[in-house]
Amino acid sequence: MLDHVANAGSEPIEPNEFVVAQLEPLEAHGDGESTDGLDTDEPDQDEPTDDDTCVEPYEYEPQHHDVVVQVMGNVQTHGADLTADETELLALLSCLRHQTEIHIGLVHESVAPERAKKTVENRISRLRGRLGVGSDGHDLLPEASSGRNGRSHYLVSPLVVTDVDLLEHRYHTAGKLSSSDALDVMRDGLELMKGPLFRARKGFDGWPQSEGVAVAMTAVVQSYATRLIELAVDVDDIALVIRTTATAGRVLDNPLSEFPMRQAEQAYADACGDTELLASVEGARQRLIEYIDADDALADV
């Protein structure tokens, strides 16, 4: 089990189709380091040199959106005034669109299996009305369209995103930038990490786990934190390493899930010997031991 957790965040995150579309303008920007296809000879006297030109600092542009469903920390929507039931419904539609066709049966079983299917259909209609039309002129929640075997399915607009989508966009954008720009982009993304996934007083009873959403989002946070630690280590920013593990740890909310980034933190702590960093590593180790001991105790009951 520990091996599985340790490797969970080591695989690169494949960008979904919405992230790919948002990243296309960056292809022309490049990473600022490659010289492929460039003339590396001395510049002509008539050509401006580095001393004559001023390179514009990179400014990150977040993924374009109209509505954000916050799932890290207390679940809520930004950009739309929704009830708790409507927020869970929009979260379901936003989280599952990259994984499966979302048909009425799946929605019914996920958010209100004890209610009549017609009740869920009415809830979807009310949500469509509340969301209205997006900045692209199209409904943020279009009518259901035909899917496989003639079964209708729902597909929410790409202008509706989750905070994890925004985090993932920063992760993939950073991969196309120089190390210094990547560090700035990813450090600012820590502000999105408000707390444990899907913290809510009502709803979210099972589908984030059964549909694999929580696992997928955990992998995003693990990979994000581990990469940011690597960038921070490159510039010996001990404070940022500690901030990253603490902030991401609140989202992961499980010592086993923290394992990949804690390995990176420990390697740096062992190398630099910083007392505060070593204390962070030791605290994480103690929490992991206590978690495993408690898990073993429950297994013996």
Image (cartoon, rainbow, N blue to C red):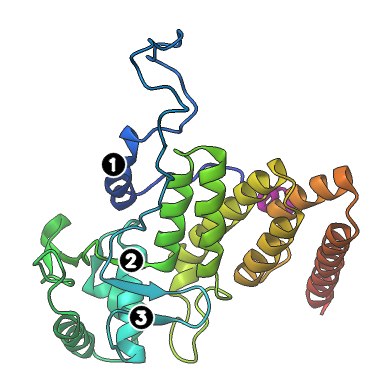
In front: label 1 or label 3: 1
* 67 to the left or right of 216: left
User: Residue 280 location in percent, x, y?
Assistant: 82, 63
* 263 to the left or right of 175: right
Magenta segment boundaries in residue numbering: 1-8
Q: CA distance from mark 2 to mark 1?
A: 19 Å
Q: Is residue 12 above or below residue 215?
A: above
- Crowding at mark 2 (Cα within 10 Å: few <14, some 14-19, many 20+): many
Mark on residue 77?
3
User: Residue 239 location in percent, x, y?
Assistant: 74, 59
Q: Can residue 1 be seen? A: no
Residue tagged 2: 161
- Crowding at mark 1 (Cα within 10 Å: few <14, some 14-19, many 20+): few
Mark on residue 25?
1
- Closer to the camera, 48 or 7? 48
User: Residue 8 location in percent, x, y?
Assistant: 61, 50
